[in-house]
Image: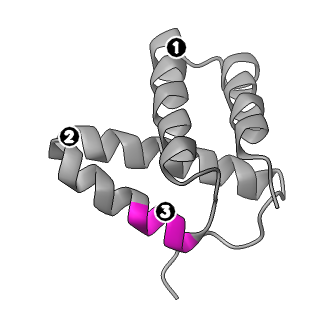
Amino acid sequence: MINLNLLIQQFLKHCKNRKALNDKTIKAYSIDLRQFAEITQNTYSKDAICRYIDQLHICFKPKTVKRKIASLKAFTHYLLVEEIIEINPFKKN
């Protein structure tokens, strides 16, 4: 089982130090990913992601949903590159 909160912290550090992203982008990533961890109860799986996205559509406007999904996809890409996960849960089989 992965420690989602620790991985989010590492991802945010990576975004700041290696990718030199804007502070506003990092803040948005932080808010979005912490919200994801809270709603999914620190579970990272395809099923948890689908439930999270369903919840987003209920609570937020489409533009906000799109940003939150983009944050989650950036985090997923990081997990794949760092070989923390092997399968992209966003990829259709």
> Farthest residue toward the bottom?
93
Instruction: For mark 1, give the secondary structure.
Output: loop
Residue 67, position as x, y percentages in the image: 34, 39
Q: Residue at x 75, y 17 (%)?
A: 17
User: Residue 55's quadrant in the figure?
Assistant: bottom left
Residue 72, position as x, y percentages in the image: 51, 48
User: Residue 51's quadrant in the figure?
Assistant: bottom left
Dot 1 or dot 3: first in sequence order is: 1
Residue 84, position as x, y percentages in the image: 82, 57
Q: Does the magenta stretch include residue 49?
A: yes
Q: Is residue 48 magenta?
A: yes
Q: Which residue is drawn at 67% across and 27% down?
A: 12
Q: Do the residues labelled 2 and 1 touch (CB within 8 Å)?
A: no
Give the answer, above or below, for where 3 lies relative to 8: below
User: Could you tell me how far apart the alpha carbons at marks 1 and 3 are, in whole angstroms?
Assistant: 26 Å
Q: Is residue 19 left or right of residue 52?
A: right
Q: Residue at x 22, y 54 (%)?
A: 57
Q: Can residue 90 be spotted in the picture? A: no
Q: What residue type is labelled 2?
A: Lys
Image mark for residue 63 = 2
- Report the magenta residues as a range: 46-51
Q: Are marks 1 and 3 in contact (CB under 8 Å)?
A: no
Image mark for residue 44 = none
The residue that mark 3 highlights is 49
The quadrant in which the N terminus is found is bottom right
Q: Which of 92 and 19 is in front in this view?
A: 92
Mark 1 surroundings: few (<14), some (14-19) or many (≥20) residues within 10 A: few
What's the colour scheme?
one colour
> Farthest residue toward the top?
23
Image mark for residue 22 = 1
> Farthest residue toward the front?
41
